[in-house]
Image (cartoon, rainbow, N blue to C red):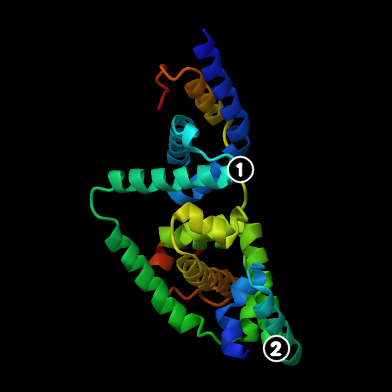
Amino acid sequence: MNCSKVREIIFLYTDNELGEELLVSVQEHVVLCPQCARRIEYTQRLLKVVRKGCTRTTAPERLRKRILTSLRHPEVEWEG
Amino acid sequence: MSGKSTSQQRGWNFEEAAMPFVDALYNTAYRMTRNAQDAEDLVQETYLKAYRYYDKFEEGTNFKAWLFKILKNTFINNYRKKQQAPPQSDFAEIEDAFESRLSSDVSGQMKSPEEEILEDVLDEDVQRALDDLPPDYRMAVLLADLEGFSYKEIADILELPLGTVMSRLYRGRKLLESAMLTYAKEHGYLRSGEPAKMRNNQLREGTKEHK
């Protein structure tokens, strides 16, 4: 494992998508490399900011009604 | 008679299974279409198609991912139908603008200014940066970061190889980071009394209120 490999697979690491073997070698590298440790910490913060910024909106009530109406009465044309 | 009750039962089953995902589908639809009315139409059509093809859904597989796959296909079809001019050229331009910003701003080197600027990023910076992302990247990022799908699920929804999903997520998030930091830097400058630096038309377009 080296720094450029860590950069390459950094999102796999933060997304918990790494296989056991790679995961262990990243962890081993990070213990000895403060730069990569910092990069990982930054990436985790970055993704947190993204998730927080993607504010969730609730589907409008009229959409639920529209969907249910068209499922229950497929012959009825919905408005819009 | 029994035919009718069977179809009624099928309808109830579908409603029960599918309706809990309406918010999730709407959120992604809204971020992809960037328009409330289009998002509603997209979700409505997704549900109708899903109901029509409900028999094809394989029990025991991921129903939420199946609904998102239908949403994705409907988005692609409608989007291409709607755009008279081929949208690819626009996307390519946006991508080029991003690419140049990417190479000038985020050179791949970890610097502490980026860590500092990250603290200045507002929710609206994230949303603007997301809206600016080319659709292919935006969809991958939304599925991962908004919906929390695994890479395998995203590959299934987008009908792409795992490697392509990984590279879209990588590029998409890097582009997003670059744009977010640029936007945050702008209002950071303004706060400290320095003039905002407008780097390209896209930014100028999106930041009129700061002038």
Dots 1 and 2 on the same chain: no
The image position of residue A42, as x and y in percent, is: 67, 77
Q: Which residue is nearer to you in this view: B101 or A73? A: A73
Label count reads: 2
Q: Which residue is nearer to you in this view: B5 or B95? A: B5
Please report the residue visible at 57 percent of the width from the left and 42 percent of the height from the top. Answer: B63
Local crowd size for mark 2, using a 10 Å CA cut-off: few (<14), some (14–19), many (≥20): some
Q: Which residue is nearer to you in this view: B90 or B88? A: B88
Q: What is the secondary structure assignment of the residue under circle 2?
A: helix
Q: Residue most toward the top? A: B1
Q: Is residue B192 visible?
A: no
- Chain letter for mark 1, please: B
In the image, residue B65 above or below residue A38: above
The image's mark for residue B60 is 1
Of tags 1 and 2, the one toward the viewer is 1
The image position of residue A31, as x and y in percent, is: 76, 88
Q: Amino acid at mark 1?
A: Gly
Q: Is residue A78 visible?
A: yes
Please report the residue visible at 55 percent of the width from the left and 60 percent of the height from the top. Answer: B152
Horizontal side of B172 relative to B79 (left or right) equals right
The image position of residue B60, as x and y in percent, is: 61, 43
Please report the residue visible at 55 percent of the width from the left and 24 percent of the height from the top. Answer: B10
Q: What is the secondary structure assignment of the residue under circle 1?
A: loop
Q: Amino acid at mark 2?
A: His
In the image, residue B126 above or below residue B31: below
Q: Which residue is mark 2?
A: A29
Quarter-of-image position of residue B52:
top left
